[in-house]
Image (cartoon, rainbow, N blue to C red):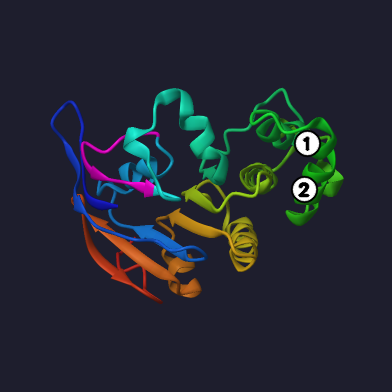
Amino acid sequence: MHDVWKVYPNGVEALRGIDVRIDYGEFVYIVGPSGAGKSSFIKLMYREEKPTHGVVLINGVNVKRVRDWKIPHVRRKIGVVFQDFKLLPHMTAFENVAFAMEAIEMPRRKIKPRVEEVLELVGLSDRMHALPSQLSGGEQQRVAIARAIVNNPSFIIADEPTGNLDPENSWDIMYLLEEINQRGTTIVMATHNKEIVNTMRQRVIAIEQGVIVRDELGGEYGYED
């Protein structure tokens, strides 16, 4: 991002003059108080929002200039994990993950082995035929992560992925994300979880009132709960 501003129609300046570079293979936490601009920062990265001013380059593509019909193509190399899972309730775990491959018109012969591979990676080989309503919160988030990585994205954006989970499941998800990162996938994660950030000691970007106030390797959360 270079000199990025995000101003909403109601006049709220969510981001002001953001300059930041995230390289391949990094694990980065985005932290800050509620309303600081973290969500806007994250949404710019997968083109849910466009910058009002400035340049956002994702894998070398200026996302502001991408026409709406080309957005799915840009997102092929981006995996997104949400706090509330966003699984399709009428589909099994297998079908939810397969749907991400079908959406980019992957040949059917490649879908089944790849979906089985990623469900094994996230520890759900024995739950692949279960519906979301039959899965625990931690299991649902594992399905969401499998869906995010099934198309071999160059990076994953995780927006409060442990926000709805108990501490044990939260750590299980973090160890899984760490393993995915060690395999070469860049991960950018917005979080309010002080314990996770302080324990994992990765790069921390802190946003307050729309500006980056801290960017440090091996950083701490830096805010009181």
Query: In the rendered view, would you say 134 is above or below 138?
Result: above
Which dot marks residue 224? Answer: none
Q: Is residue 103 left or right of residue 107?
A: left
Q: Residue at x 55, y 53 (%)?
A: 154
Residue at the extreme left: 11
Measure the alpha-carbon separation of dots 2 and 1: 8 Å
Judge by depth and name the residue closer to the eye, 165 or 150. Answer: 150
The reply to whether callout 2 and callout 1 are in contact (CB within 8 Å) is: yes
Residue type for callout 1? Phe
Residue type for callout 2? Leu
Mark 2 / mark 1, whichever is N-terminal: 1
User: x, y percentage for residue 47?
Assistant: 40, 36
Q: Is residue 92 left or right of residue 190?
A: right
Name the element at disc 1: helix
Q: Residue at x 62, y 57 (%)?
A: 173
Query: In the rendered view, would you say 190 is above or below 112?
Result: below
Residue under label 1: 94
Judge by depth and name the residue closer to the eye, 3 or 159. Answer: 3
User: x, y percentage for residue 187?
Assistant: 51, 58
Judge by depth and name the residue closer to the eye, 84 or 100. Answer: 100
Q: Which residues are magenta?
A: 48-57
Name the element at disc 2: helix
Quadrant position of residue 109: top right
Q: Residue at x 36, y 48 (%)?
A: 57
Asked if the stretch drawn in magenta spans residue 79, the answer is no
Residue under label 2: 119
Judge by depth and name the residue closer to the eye, 81 or 164. Answer: 81
User: x, y percentage for residue 24?
Assistant: 49, 63
